[in-house]
Amino acid sequence: MAMRQTPLTCSGHTRPVVDLAFSGITPYGYFLISACKDGKPMLRQGDTGDWIGTFLGHKGAVWGATLNKEATKAATAAADFTAKVWDAVTGDEVLTLAHKHIVKSVNFTQDSNCLLTGGNDKVLRIYDLGKPEAEPQEIAGHTSAIKKALWCNNDQQILSAADDKTIRLWDKNTKEVVKSLSFDASVSSMEYIPDGEVLVITYGRTIAFYKAHSLDLIKTVDAPASIHSASLHPDKDFFVAGGDDFKLYKYDYTTKEEMESYKGHFGPIHCVRFSPDGELYASGSEDGTLRLWQTAVGKTYGLWKCVLPEELSSENSEVLYCPPAEIKA
């Protein structure tokens, strides 16, 4: 008897969900933030999807959202030409950082003291959050809108992906490009794994893995549909990807073989990320929902409770039975 994947559906957003991010593991569990075109980023308990609060203040679509490791601060990037920093415990707005165009990406340093932003004005900015009145450091070079910008190498370097079909690795101090990669299609997503320094990117139907320090290619995998996002499991055993055909694909990282695919969303998938403990992955879609999926189907974790019905509980059977009901969070 095969296990049935039963995703948790997180409703609440009214427009497409375009970005999501997990915090690290804290004494209170881990947390999940979602960016949505409805302009109202939401904070949830990461393992259950339970809604905690909504950050209110943006006047346009929110394109990017992130949490610091401790889940005490949140940052959002929006179409109202601002990035905002929030107290993730109280929900209060802490800072509004004015930009010259739509902001697409926000990323904290490990110590949460600096914020990196990128967007449609093609410039990377580094804000010292301890000196909000100071002008940010600016790094120019991209020739089209920046989609994603991430700290790497212990916050000494920056990775950026833009609509100019390049990914660039920058030195934070010299503000010079260390290395650049060019692609034949616009890069749709980028994930940086500090443990092992792996960079996961997607473009067209391709999921590609690079060494973050050198931008040397590790491997590529081609999917059956155009892919918008991919995420590598913390143990690097497998990765998940989602895109235009509403499906989530799970691949073996070593062999590159497709292990399974799941359909649950009713629109293209824009973002997917593994939780920090690797027990689940979250997906955000054009359909306005987030869904949480179990990494090991049939395991009791979070809201998933797997029971052995009487007819399966003979000594010969070790099959776990998961009720197929849809669970709403």
Image (spheres, grey):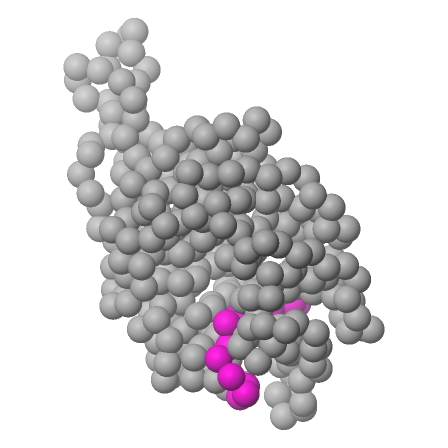
Residue placed at 48% from the left, 33% from the top? 251
Q: How many marks?
A: 0
Query: Up-down: is 315 above or below 91?
Result: above
Q: Is residue 172 visible?
A: yes
Magenta highlight range: 98-115
Q: Nearer the viewer, residue 81 or 167?
A: 167
Residue placed at 33% from the left, 53% from the top? 268
Residue that lies at the very extreme toward the right in this rendered image: 174
Residue placed at 44% from the left, 70% from the top? 63
Query: Up-down: is 111 above or below 5?
Result: below
> Residue 67, image x and y in percent?
51, 65
Query: Up-down: is 237 above or below 139?
Result: above
Residue placed at 37% from the left, 76% from the top? 61
Specify the quadrant of the image occupied by residue 219: top right
Q: Nearer the viewer, residue 271 or 233?
A: 271
Q: Quadrant of the N terminus?
A: top left
Q: Nearer the viewer, residue 175 or 232?
A: 175
Residue that lies at the very extreme toward the front in this rendered image: 184
Q: Is residue 235 left or right of residue 8?
A: right
Q: Is residue 117 magenta?
A: no
> Residue 155, image x and y in percent?
72, 64
> Residue 86, image x and y in percent?
47, 77
> Residue 324, image x and y in percent?
20, 34
Q: Is residue 112 magenta?
A: yes
Residue that lies at the very extreme toward the top in this rendered image: 316
Specify the quadrant of the image occupied by residue 79: bottom left
Q: Is residue 154 left or right of residue 71?
A: right
Q: Is residue 110 visible?
A: no
Q: Nearer the viewer, residue 121 or 92?
A: 121
